Image (cartoon, helix red, strand yellow):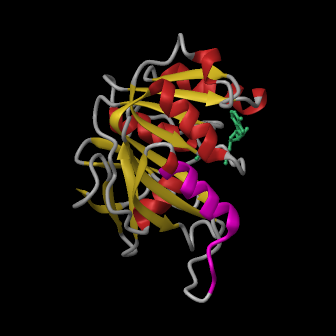
Amino acid sequence: MSEVVSVKPHSKYFGVYVVEMEDGSIRLATKNLVPGTRVYGERLFRFENVEYREWNMYRSKLAGALGNGISEMPIREGHRILYLGVASGTTASHISDIIGVNGKVFGVEFAPRVMREFVIVADSRKNLIPILADARKPYQYRHVVELVDGLYADVAQPDQALIVADNAEYFLKDGGYLLMAIKARSIDVTKEPSEVYRKEVNTLKERGFEIVDVVHLEPYDRDHAMVLAVYHR
Ligand code: SAM
């Protein structure tokens, strides 16, 4: 375990902690729901008898968005969240830490290989519910997923906004939030946003989403931005 000087709740983001290391560097972390276990080789920190897991901004786009000051982090204890493209659960494991034992993440993933890894993570984190399915076919998992407070999307598909909107119609409550990783080049005022980016944001607006913030993930991820939006039915 690494030496830490202090761990403090983040001044802006619920369930997120700021870890100050001996060398003066600052890390983001969440409280480990399953002490003693790692999910993706992340560092574990112990401070005042509580164990935290480093939330790596280069490995998780949501952590990158927090590092770059997204206006709000809407995830709260007890929330139910539908996660499209959960992969092996790197980001989902931190959401699992934040929502705690009373929350649920319905994790949709269509690639069996990474799903197998996610199932292992979900074995020790009972608030993660693996769903091996295609996010383009929400009707196939409508009997498993409940009405959710939030939708997290990172399926890396060019028509992701359509996939998100179809899932929102089934599962996202009125006033619920969306966090969506979107392909976007670095923010450069001299460059126009790409056609795909513009089309994706327009689709979201047409299908009931009000955009709250868009934050680029550079330097943690050069190709993506994180969109935060609110859904109106
Ligand atoms: N969000 C993950 C994280 O932060 O830990 C990383 C997600 S990775 C960029 C994208 C994932 O979406 C891949 O695992 C891919 O298999 C999955 N995916 C792509 N299209 C999908 C679809 N139509 N339905 C379900 N999963 C899909």
Q: Residue furthest bottom?
A: 190
From the viewer's side, name the closer residue of 67 and 44.
67
Does residue 127 lie above or below 23 as drawn? above
Q: Is residue 54 left or right of residue 158?
A: left
Asked whether residue 173 is drawn in magenta, I would say: no
* Residue 92, image x, y percentages: 51, 38
Q: Is residue 103 left or right of residue 163?
A: left
From the viewer's side, name the closer residue of 197 and 16.
197
* Residue 209, image x, y percentages: 43, 47
Q: In this view, does 57 lie to the left or right of 31?
A: right
Q: Residue at x 58, y 84 (%)?
A: 188
In the rendered image, the quadrant that contains the C terminus is: top left
Q: Which residue is drawn at 77% across and 30% down?
A: 113
* Residue 87, image x, y percentages: 65, 37
Q: Can residue 195 be seen in this view?
A: yes
Does residue 33 lie above or below 212 as drawn? above
What secondary structure prevails in the magenta region?
Answer: helix
* Residue 212, image x, y percentages: 37, 58
Q: Residue furthest front?
A: 206
From the viewer's side, name the closer residue of 160 and 100.
160
The span shown in magenta is 191-205
Q: Residue furthest top?
A: 143
Asked whether residue 199 is drawn in magenta, I would say: yes
Q: Which residue is drawn at 38% across and 37% down?
A: 97
From the viewer's side, name the closer residue of 174 and 150.
174
Q: Is residue 60 visible?
A: no
Quick check: which quadrant has ligand 1?
A: top right
Q: Which residue is drawn at 76% across and 31% down?
A: 111
